[in-house]
Amino acid sequence: MTKLTDLTVAGIRDGFRAGDFSAREVAEGFNAAVAGAKALNAFIVDTPDHALAAADAADAARAAGDAAKPLAGVPIGMKDLFCTKGVQTTAASHILEGFVPPYESTVSGKLWEAGAGMLGKLNLDQFAMGSSNETSYFGNVISPWRRNDGGNAAMAPGGSSGGSASAIAARLCPAATGTDTGGSIRQPAAFVGISGIKPTYGRCSRWGVVAFASSLDQAGPMARDVRDCAIMLEAMSGFDAKDSTSLDLEVPHWEAGLSSDLKGKRVGIPKEYRVEGMPAEIEALWQQGIDWLRDAGAEIVEVSLPHTRYALPAYYIIAPAEASSNLARYDGVRYGQRELPEGANLQDMYAATRSAGFGPEVKRRIMIGTYVLSAGYYHAYYTQAQKVRTLIARDFAEAWDHCDLLLTPTAPSAAFALGEKMADPLAMYLNDVFTVPSSLAGLPAMSVPGGLDAGGLPLGLQVIGRPLDEQSVLNAGLALEERAGFTARAEAWW
C-alpha cells in the first residue's frame, strides 16, 4: 500500500471515500511528517489538533452515511498570510507576532467548509516580499532539494510561498495555499518541482489575506500535480461581497473539465521572453515544452508582447507604492507588536514600533513606495508605471487575436543557494521576469515541472491564459505534465 503521505489530494479524497483508510490515519501521518521536518523551517505554527478535528468530523460523517465533502479527509498547509480564526497570523513579520485573528479569511473558510483540515501555518517571505524565503522574521525556509555537486548547500525554495513549496515537495502536506503578487506561487513551484496556479485576478477573495499590493495580490493553490490544483482552486474560488474586487461569477468544474487534448488550440511563443543571457538548459526546456504541446495537438505560433521589457520596472514601482500604503496600518496601535520607549510620545511610538517590527526588505520597499507616491514624483513614477501596465495588458489582449495560450519558462534559472543573491536586490528581482507581466495584466497563469537542470534541480514551464480561462491553462498544464512524466523528488535528509 502506498504511504499515506505520498498520496495526492485526489488520492486521499478517493481512498477515504472508498474506505481504504480513515481521515484520522491521514492526519496523523502528516502531523508526524510535519513534526519530523523542523530542519526545513517550513511551518511557523503547527496545528495538529485542527487537522485531527477535521479528520474526526470526516470519519464521523462517513460512518453516519453522509455525503462526503469535496476535501473530506484531506489535511493541507495554510500560508501564514491568510488570517485564521484563533490561530496566530504573522505574515512572517515581527510586527504581527502574537496577532491572533478573531475572524477567518474567506479562502481558508471555504477550504474548511469543503472538509479540509489545517496542518499548520506556513512560512513565507515577510509580508510576501521576496523571491527566496530569506526575509522571514522566523528564519529561512530550506528547500528539500540539494544540488548533485556534493556541496550540500542549503537551497532556496523560492518566494514568497516558499514554505508552501517546501512542505509539499517534502511530503509534509499534499497541497497548500499560496498567494501570487508577481510570481509568488509560480516561481517557488518551479524551484521545487510541483504545480501551482495563479487564477484570474478576482477569482479568489482577498478578504482576510494580509495585503501586500492590493491590485496584484491573488490567492491560488499549490500541489503536486495539475488535478490537485484544479480540486483546490474549485474550493477556494467564488464571489465574496466583502471583497470589492471579487468576481461575481459561477465557479467552473475545473477538475471535471480536465483534458490534455489540445486540438484546435493555438499556443503563442512570445519572442520577447528570449532574454539575453538565458541559460541554455532553460532554452532547451522551453523548446521541449513547445514540442510537447504540439504533440498534444496544439498549433504553435510566434507572438509579440513588445512592452515586456518594461514590466519588471513598472512592477517594482506599483507594488512598493501599494505596499507602503497598505503597511501604514501597522503602527503599534491596532495589531501585534508595540515598542514604547520610556518618555516616548505617539510619534516616537510609531517610529519605534515600525523600526523594530519591519525587516530590511520590507523597509526598502516602503521607502521606495513612499518616494514614488510623494508630491512631485507621483506622476513621474507611479502614473507612468500605471500607463506601462495598461500597455502590457494591451499586448496580451492583442496576442489573444492570434493564440489561446502562451508558453514560457517560469523562472530564468533553477533554484539558487540561500545567500547567493541576497546582496544584490536587482538580481533577486530578476527572478520574477517571466511571471510579472501576467500579474500586471491579471491573467491566469500556471507553473508545472518540466525537468531537471545539470545540477539535478527542478525547472518549470509556465502557461498563461486569457482572463477567466483557467480551464485551458489547466488543460495545457496537464498536457505538459503527462509528457514530462516528472517523478523526481528530493531525498529525505531532514
Image (tube, grey):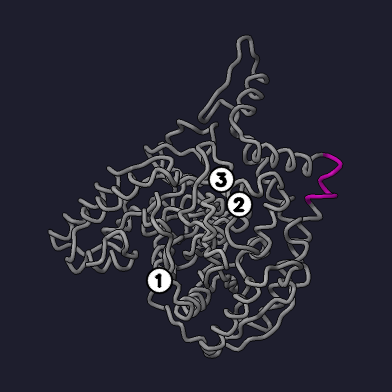
Magenta stretch: includes residue 11: no
Can you tell which mark lies on residue 227? 1
Q: Are marks 2 and 3 in contact (CB under 8 Å)?
A: yes
- Outermost residue, top direction? 343
- Pinpoint residue 277: horizontal percent, then vertical percent: 74, 66
Which of pointers 1 and 2 lies earlier in the amino acid sequence? 2
- Pinpoint residue 187: horizontal percent, then vertical percent: 57, 60
- Pinpoint residue 147: horizontal percent, then vertical percent: 53, 58
How packed mark 1 is, by other alpha carbons closer than 10 Å (few <14, some 14-19, many 20 or more), is many
Which of pointers 2 and 3 lies earlier in the amino acid sequence? 3
The answer to whether one can see residue 343 in this image is: yes
Which of pointers 1 and 3 lies earlier in the amino acid sequence? 3
Three-letter code, disc 2: Ser
- Pinpoint residue 415: horizontal percent, then vertical percent: 57, 58
Instruction: Determine whether 144 is above or below 226 in the image.
Output: above
Nearer mark to the viewer, of 1 and 2? 2
Which residue is at 46% across, 60% downward?
Answer: 221
* Distance from the alpha carbon under mark 1 to that under mark 2: 26 Å
Instruction: Determine whether 130 is above or below 249 in the image.
Output: above
* Distance from the alpha carbon under mark 2 to that under mark 3: 8 Å
In terms of depth relative to the viewer, which is nearer, 404 or 241? 404
Label 3 residue SS: loop
Can you tell which mark lies on residue 131? 2
In terms of depth relative to the viewer, which is nearer, 414 or 332? 414
Label 1 residue SS: helix
Quadrant of the image occupied by residue 308: bottom right
Which residue is at 38% across, 38% downward?
Answer: 87
Quadrant of image for the N terminus:
bottom left
Which residue is at 16% across, 54% downward?
Answer: 60
Over which residues does the magenta segment extend?
375-382
Total numbered circles: 3
Can you tell which mark lies on residue 125? 3
